[in-house]
């Protein structure tokens, strides 16, 4: 079976560079999709309380013949639980839903600078507790801009292990990636395929034709060669399997440059701007 490269995080823990994301997979479809991914060789699952499918991720892992230690599991704190006490309750609920006594990685899902008086530092301190207790083997953030990260750096003890941000050929995020590289924060690229939007791009298609690969495989390979961590989502078993087949070829410098050159800056975002996003779920 193909072996997935590991990335070593700033605390010495390792994370498989390639995994499976379950955003927008209905709870009723999640266990089957995760089982397909585990059977195909994926060993890293990215979920979140906000996705409403943590229990089904846990169910698929429990049903597999893999030990808990063989699967890297990430979840994220929901936007309604940034007050430290709420974060503690939410984290307990996440572990319970997943049916495990630890997660490999736990993230603040969004910085929400327009909520909670802009105080994501108190929230980060709650994650530091989970880390010290060993219930989160690594902790990190998602959708943090360099100025948010600078605040954590100045005011807290632990540097986030990862920053999970939107990255794909239309939004290459070179500034945030460079800042994180300089602070030993690994980048996880969410919506690595731009939710499918980049797959019809003529430049991507032409690289794919030359490589004898699909556009999705070429884009995922581009992320891997840039050193980012990726976890594409699909509920189609064929795509789940083919997205994994990216470790038997490589892109040359010109091909990498052609894809990176598709960047559209802010206009390339498919998701919300982290400096403005203030969504709180209504539960
Ligand atoms: P993605 O870029 O992985 O695209 C998923 C879509 O692309 C699928 O719905 C499917 O339609 C299409 N697709 C997948 N494989 C394909 C293939 N081989 N050929 C053609 N089309 C294909 O988008 P995503 O799901 O938004 O992102 C991946 C993961 O990132 C999520 O599941 C989630 O875990 C994470 N994420 C995190 C955040 C965050 O705020 N932290 C936000 C969005 C996503």
Image (cartoon, rainbow, N blue to C red):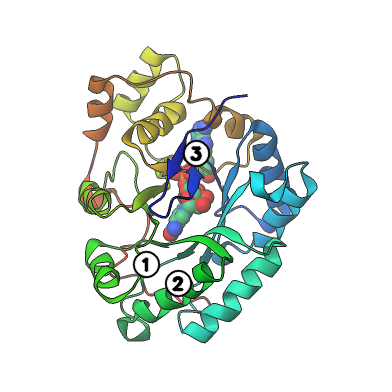
Residue 100, percent from left and from top: 69, 61
Percent across and percent down for residue 86 are 54, 83
Cα distance between the residues tagged 3 and 2: 25 Å
Residue 245 sits above or below residue 22 on the image: above
Q: CA distance from mark 2 to mark 1?
A: 7 Å
Asked if residue 183 is positioned above or below residue 228 in the image, the reply reads below
- Find numbered disc 2 in the image and state the secondary structure of the residue it sits on: helix
Disc assigned to residue 167? none
| CA distance separating discs 3 and 1 | 25 Å
Residue at image location 46% in from the left, 23% down from the top: 214
Query: Do the residues under discs 2 and 1 have CB atoms within 8 angstroms?
Result: yes
Query: Left or right: where does residue 233 sit relative to residue 225?
Result: right
The residue to which callout 3 is attached is 18
Tag 1 or tag 3, which sits nearer the N-term?
Answer: 3
**If you read the primary sequence from the N terminus, does the residue marked by circle 2 or circle 1 appear first?**
2
Q: Nearer the viewer, mark 3 or mark 1?
A: 1
For image coordinates 60% across by 41% down, the residue present is: 43
First in residue order: circle 3 vs circle 2: 3
Mark 1 sits on what residue? 158
Q: Position of residue 49 (x, y in %)?
A: 58, 66
Which one is in front, 233 or 252?
Answer: 252
Instruction: List x then y, in percent, for residue 82.
Output: 45, 79
Count numbered badges in the picture. 3
Q: Which residue is mark 2?
A: 128
Quadrant of the rendering where the C terminus is positioned? bottom right
**Element at label 1:** loop
Residue 241 appears in the picture as rendered: yes
Q: Secondary structure at mark 3?
A: loop
Q: Is residue 95 left or right of residue 261?
A: right
Residue at (37, 42) in percent of width and height:
228
Q: Residues within 10 Å of mark 1 (few under 14, many from 20)?
A: some
Q: In what quadrant of the picture does the N terminus appear?
A: top right
């Amino acid at each position: 079976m193909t072996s997935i490269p590991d990335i070593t995080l700033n605390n010495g823990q390792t994370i498989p560079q390639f995994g499976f994301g379950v955003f927008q997979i209905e709870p009723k479809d999640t266990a089957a999709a995760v089982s397909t991914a585990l059977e195909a060789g994926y060993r890293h699952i990215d979920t979140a309380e906000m996705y409403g499918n943590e229990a089904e991720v846990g169910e698929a892992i429990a049903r597999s013949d893999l030990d808990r230690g063989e699967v890297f599991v990430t979840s994220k704190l929901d936007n309604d639980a940034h007050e430290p006490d709420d974060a503690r309750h939410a984290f307990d609920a996440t572990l319970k839903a997943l049916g495990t006594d630890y997660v490999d990685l736990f993230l603040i899902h969004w910085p929400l600078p327009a909520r909670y008086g802009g105080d994501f530092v108190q929230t980060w301190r709650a994650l530091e507790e989970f880390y010290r207790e060993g219930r989160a083997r690594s902790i990190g953030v998602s959708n943090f801009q360099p100025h948010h990260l600078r605040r954590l750096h100045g005011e807290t003890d632990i540097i986030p292990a990862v920053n999970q941000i939107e990255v794909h050929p239309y939004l290459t995020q070179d500034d945030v990636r460079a800042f994180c590289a300089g602070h030993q924060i690994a980048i996880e690229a969410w919506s690595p395929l731009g939710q499918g939007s980049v797959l019809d791009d003529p430049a991507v298609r032409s690289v794919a034709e030359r490589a004898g690969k699909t556009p999705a495989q070429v884009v995922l390979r581009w992320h891997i060669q840039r050193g980012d961590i990726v976890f594409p989502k699909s509920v189609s078993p064929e795509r789940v399997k083919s997205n994994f087949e990216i470790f038997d070829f490589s892109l040359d410098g010109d091909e990498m440059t052609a894809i990176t050159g598709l960047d559209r800056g802010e206009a390339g975002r498919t998701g919300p701007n982290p400096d403005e996003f203030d969504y709180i779920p209504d539960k």
